[in-house]
Image: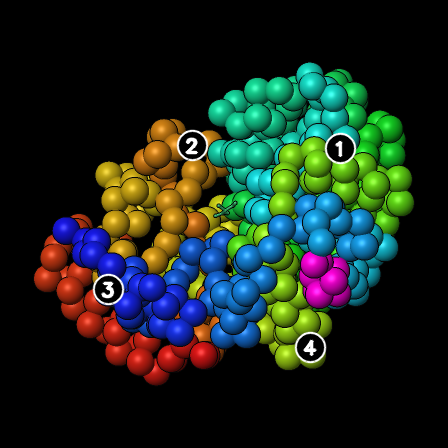
Amino acid sequence: MPETTLAPSDSDVSAATLADTDPAIAKLIAAEAQRQEHTLELIASENHCSAAVMAAQGSCLTNKYCEGYPAKRYYSGCGFYDEVESLAIERAKQMFGCGFANVQPHSGANANFAVQLALLEPGATFAAIQLSDGGHLTHGSPVNVSGKWLNPVTYKLVDDESRDDWGHIDYDSVDAVCAEHKPKVLMCGYSAYPRTIDFAKFRAIADKHGCLLWADVAHIAGLIVGGAHPSPFPHCHIVSTTTHKTLRGPRGGLVLTNDEDLAKKIDRAVFPGSQGGPLMHVIAAKAVAFGEALRPTFKTYASEVVKNAQALASALMGKGYKLSSNGTDNHLMVVDLRPTDPDLAGKEAALWLETAGIITSMSTVPKETRKPFNPSGLRLGTPALTTRGLGADDMNTVAELIDRVLTSKGDQGKLDAVRSDVVELCKKFPMPH
Ligand code: DSN
């Protein structure tokens, strides 16, 4: 049972620490810090942000309502907040080399909803890739507003395994889907796609069929900013992203464009279209993270993330694992578990790995044969391990640990032995703050 009592000192919140005022929550946060310290974080969409980012997010800026935009607020007392938001906007523009940024979306899903509200009428057609091929819920899934209120049509991955580009975007299919359905918006950018996105090729197809081109670069934003993946600009009309994955900021969203009219539509779609008061403490933390990403060391980080992913992918393939598209160009890979163990599905594999201190996420794979809640694959990524300082040589050790788990048949003794080795490895790479 969690503790629920408040300490008697809760009358003086400003002077007290969290441990004094709410020991139950303080204890859970401390336990989570220990969990992060003693496990290997391989979820492709997670990272360890800096103490400076957390300090900004945990600041008094959480206290203020600032509906509106800098110098156009609906509340008094917003002067410092205007400066904070303007700094975040300027740094976002500088990071991506574009003309306009909206830093208010609370999340990637909110950013994508705002883009859809700005660009598409109810029932309008847009083209994207489906969830099981590496897309995202907000890219037209029938359980999301994007699939309920809009008309998504889907293009495919190359599914001929004899081709060198097996598992890559099938650009012929993108062209064919646009020719057939004439979508108003063509969307690229994915949650489980291990290959480089050819934004110029997408733009040529978009222009041919009169579509606006929208990229959701949530997963690869940090790689783009760090120069380890080509930029969506100048090719894309609109770019949305999260700020907490490879970009290593606080949890949140961001929308970017070079087009002034689209920028105005996006601003209106974020507020008042789909959100109220911006989370100013999070916007401050975004500004801090963007400042970090603009430093030269972030380029090194982004390139190390990719090198580590490629080293991990090679080591796993060397052990006989099948990876979607036979490898990776970016920070993530998708392991299809079926060829190595037809009885082992993603949910159980992720559970065994978690027991051993290796944190991953289950994933659908191309030509999926199981249900999304127990799919056939695992998605692995290197952003967080790279932040901790693990390098390409350490990826052989990580692959060895993963292999020991996946071949353990769930034997508790074997999982416990891996857990001890994981703890030892983690001790060599303490959290960088
Ligand atoms: N849930 C995120 C991911 O894991 O990719 C996307 O929003």
- Tell me the distance, in whole angstroms, between the alpha carbons under discs 3 and 1: 48 Å
Which mark identifies residue 295? 4
Q: Which of marks 4 and 1 is nearer the N terminus?
A: 1
- Tell me the distance, in whole angstroms, between the alpha carbons under discs 2 and 4: 41 Å
Q: Which of marks 1 and 2 is nearer the N terminus?
A: 1
Helix, strand or loop under label 1: helix
Q: Name the residue under label 3.
A: 7
- Tell me the distance, in whole angstroms, between the alpha carbons under discs 1 and 2: 33 Å
Residue span colored magenta = 77-85
Residue 136 image position (x, y, % from top left): 55, 38
Q: Is 231 within the magenta?
A: no
- Do residues under tags 3 and 1 come within 8 Å of each other at their CB atoms? no
Q: Identify the residue at horizontal 71%, vertical 58% (top origin).
A: 78
Q: Compared to 283, does 297 lie above or below?
A: below
Amino acid of disc 3: Ala
Q: Which of marks 4 and 1 is in front?
A: 1
Q: Mark 2 points at which residue?
A: 368
Report the residue that reaches farthest toward the left: 413
- Tell me the distance, in whole angstroms, between the alpha carbons under discs 3 and 2: 51 Å
Helix, strand or loop under label 4: loop
Neighbour class for label 4 at 10 Å: few (<14), some, many (≥20)? few
Helix, strand or loop under label 3: loop
What is the magenta segment's predominant secondary structure?
Answer: helix
Which mark identifies residue 1? none
Q: Which of marks 3 and 1 is in front?
A: 3
Q: Earlier in the sequence, mark 3 or mark 2?
A: 3
Which mark identifies residue 118? 1
Q: Compared to 359, does 294 lie above or below?
A: below
Amino acid of disc 2: Glu
- Do residues under tags 3 and 2 come within 8 Å of each other at their CB atoms? no
Residue 356 image position (x, y, % from top left): 23, 61
